[in-house]
Image: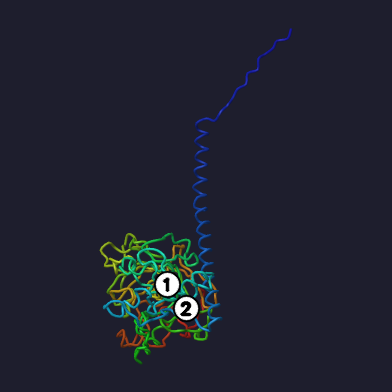
Amino acid sequence: MQTQRNSVRIRRGFTLVELLVVIAIIGVLVGLLLPAVQAAREAARRMSCSNNVKQLGLALHNYHSTYQKLPRQLGGTNGHFDKGSSGGNNLRRYAPGNNGGELSALVGLTPFFEQQALWEQISNPYQVSEGTGAGNIYQPMGPWPNRTLIESVNSASGLYDPWITEIPTLRCPSDPYVGLPAQGRSNYGVCYGDSIDQTIGNMYHPYNGTFYASSTTIQKVQAATRGMFQPEIDNKFRDVLDGLSNTIAMGEFVTDNGDNDKRTVGVKGVSVKLAGGVLGCESYVDPERPRFWADTTSILNAGNVEWRRGMRWASGYAIFTGMFTILPPNREICYSSGYVQGDGILTPSSNHQGGCHVLMGDGAVRFISDSIDSGDLNRAMVAISSVNGDSTLSVPGAASPYGVWGALGTRGGREVISEEF
């Protein structure tokens, strides 16, 4: 007799301990992978930013090949017409307007970095199509690029759209800030060199474009503006005596977001050109948040949020499209005067870890570390001694006092750069 046994199947599941272990492993893996994903994304953004700088380098060389000179920083058109009784200042504001010779070098480069359509709008008469100013016509090269959005002239004459256009090539993907109150943000600008003296433009009359600089002013300009770009002057590659591969042409910087970032808004009233003045703004930095100014700091143009770093790609003012090789990258902005057109130390900066991109004169893109050798920051800037009062420390034609960083900013200092940077 055969006995049949019923087979009993035992089903087993996960115990609570096993489930917790699996969850813990998944949590650890996610914790390990997320930073790697974020790092990969930032690496991609940094590469895209580098490509933008490379495009500007190609545009610069193509411009020079076409015109046998570099685009002028603080250049453009002027006029002799006026509106109302408030003098020459209105020449630049109302339609048909003129830019007062205060355009950035980026304007001239637009057709060379694939913005031909925008250049066609700028270089031809432009008719306002919307608003109360509809029908008004601006002359070629547009009105003054430093008009504010809150000015009544914008409703009377109409907005000039090319100046408020945001150009992708001029934006670093790691800079998330967009839109108002900026009128066309830019993360890139030209290099003025290792001295801020005479860099606001002193050669031509700001209203009608007539040459009014005295021989003393010309002497001061030549002594102090030692970068590849000089305000209101057309330089050429032949002027770069240190060699294009040893001279910075352009640099990167972050744009302002209204958060008191020390890299996008400046402290005012510090004697930055004197010996030790370069470091004069350090004491205003919040010790607990070293990327920002302390709450009690007196900010330059605190009431006008449009006058901040990188807010106008078309303007030739250094706060918008310029940089200096004095303080190393990602340091504070510091002004000797009470207005942004004045003398201010404007360092390059970025949201990339540890430094920022610069464009060398030969078209190469280099990443400059925040810790680059910047020499003796207690030295006065190179200028004519009567300007800054430090005749023993500031000698025209002297080697840059700001180390490798300063030497990279000068076009003809004849410094020998013997180390990697």
In the rendered structure, the answer to whether residue 407 lies left or right of residue 4 reads: left
Q: Is residue 91 visible?
A: yes
In the rendered structure, the answer to whether residue 145 lies left or right of residue 118 reads: left
User: Dot 2 corresponds to which residue?
Assistant: 408
CA separation in Å, label 2 and label 1? 26 Å
List x then y, in percent, for residue 418: 51, 79
Depicted 130 relative to depicted 232: above or below: above
Q: Residues within 10 Å of mark 1 (few under 14, many from 20)?
A: many
**331 or 312: nearer the viewer:** 312
User: Dot 1 corresponds to which residue?
Assistant: 314
Name the kind of residue labelled 1 in the image: Ala
Q: Is residue 206 visible?
A: no
Describe the element under mark 1 as helix, strand or loop: loop
**401 or 152: nearer the viewer:** 152
**123 or 350: nearer the viewer:** 123
List x then y, in percent, for residue 100: 37, 79
- The residue lying at 46 percent from left, 73 percent from top is 122
Name the kind of residue labelled 2 in the image: Leu
List x then y, in percent, for residue 212: 35, 88
Image-quadrant location for residue 159: bottom left
